[in-house]
Amino acid sequence: MDFRELDRLDRRDMLRGAAIVGAGAALMQPIPLWAQSGSMADIRKAAEAGKAASIQRIRDWIALPSIAAENRNMVEGAAFMAGLARDAGFNNVEIVPTDGHPGVFGTIDVGAPRTLGIYFMYDVKQFDPAEWSSPPLEGKMVERPGFGQAIMGRGAVNQKGPEATFLAALHAIRAAGRKLPVNIVLVCEGEEEIGSPHFRQIATKPNILAALKKCEGIFIPFASQGKTGNVTVNLGSKGIIELELVASGEKWGRGPKGDVHSSLKAMVDSPAWRLVQALQTLVTPDGNRPAIEGWFENVRPLTDREKTLIREAAKAGDEAAQKQALGITHWIDNLSYDDALIRLAQEPTVNIEGLVAGYTGPGGKTILPGRAVAKLDLRLVPNQTRAEAEKKLRVHLDKHGFPDVEVKVSGGYDPTEVAEDSRLVRSELATYRSLGVATSVNPRMAGSWPGATFTAPPVSIPAAHFGIGHGSGAHAPDEYYLIDSTNPKVAGLVDATMGFAEFLYVLAAIK
């Protein structure tokens, strides 16, 4: 639908008739009128008036890439984030030191009965400008067929565009002369792209922990729409461990300590083959299932309800389009689409991100490398934990005769789960319904974010994703975030801003 149509609908009839529907089950609950007639129209006018400033906010943020893996602009990135928070109305904004890169914290207290947490990240992934069709730090406007005009740049959709859009909602509500319906707690980090190794230090700092524990829940802004406009509400995310496995002649006590001529292979051991042999023990021969001892002993299988949710969502999916986008012709083990989606949610994984050893340039160099490195990510599902998985990996390598292969963990966190009947999820579903956005409920997204920092003790609050709008290319070249939509089913910047505003008022009102 055209999102502007909402301004011409009767708010009382629409909200009181809202139902929370989750793919096969309906949790019916009326929602009281949240504001006087015309309030949302006033906020929209303010959002439209502030659109140019909102675009510039995203463009300025893209121009300052904070890359934790390279220790690039981390101090500057935290300072910029703090400035964004202050401009949006957050008080008591502080830059929070950690043993790694700093975080940012702030609050808005309007004396409301309810408080909402919001999680931001100010860091982005690395990039190679040669791979981009538009300079990755310029934030140029480009045409995306089927969607409209988008801003292109590193961090555009992951996560600066959606985060800046949430801030735009706060600016619009204030510019419209309206009072926020909820108090807001902002917690931000600069290490999400390296596995959030120090984020717990931020979340459990006494004043921050006290603020978080008052929250109904916390969410990360999310550009959730594809061409159909449909949104998937995820009831959790997989955990992750990012690490390197390193085989070297120095640690092994065999093979060279440095690179030597390849002709010597007939009489000298190879650390690179040593690493390959170690990697082969981690998975089944086809590479499709982890083979680390005890890896599945705490894995919680999906319930029948969760499998039903996935099968229902699959009916609305476009299998052919997804295969085309991924550049594949078959799902793993030749599974059907819905069975592949069930496996996607249910299975932990051992994935090789990259392999590095010796010479990889043009032509050959005929060397025998003295060191080989594999970059891995391990995706975890409930009820696995990061600590358990790290221990089992080390025990496995030792048992199989690879005590010399080093395990260097750079970051990670446990899986996240949120209850389907939590006020946070019910508010999300109610908001999407009031906006006319079709939804499905997914038990668990395959991607990861540090939501477990919030859902686990000592914070212990629900955590989820929320948002409308569109973007693509996270971690890849030509990353973009939609600004002016030509697709009537997909929100552009102003409509996405209004979606966040709507969510705040629904959360304040829902029982």
Image (tube, grey):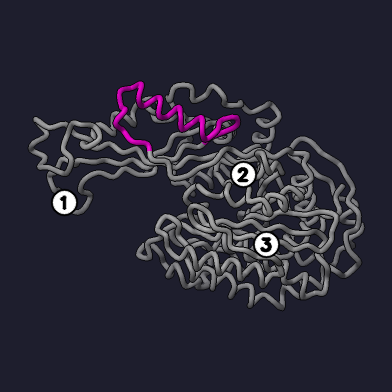
Q: Around disc 2, counting alpha carbons within 10 Å, would you say few (fewer than 14), some (14 to 19), or many (20 or more)?
A: many
The amino acid on which the numbered mark 2 sits, given as a three-letter code, is Thr
* Residue sitting nearer the eye, 242 or 226: 242
The amino acid on which the numbered mark 1 sits, given as a three-letter code, is Gly
Q: Is residue 378 above or below residue 494?
A: above
Horizontal relation, residue 173 to residue 487: left or right: right
Q: Residue at x 65, y 37 (%)?
A: 443
Pinpoint residue 483: horizontal percent, then vertical percent: 61, 68
The amino acid on which the numbered mark 3 sits, given as a three-letter code, is Gly
Q: Name the residue under label 3.
A: 106
Mark 1 residue element? loop
Q: In this view, does 234 lie above or below 45?
A: above
Pinpoint residue 503: horizontal percent, then vertical percent: 76, 57
Q: Mark 1 or 2, which is nearer the eye?
A: 2
Sequence order check, earlier mark of 1 and 3: 3
CA distance separating discs 2 and 3: 18 Å
Q: Mark 1 points at which residue?
A: 363
Q: Does the magenta stretch include residue 339?
A: no
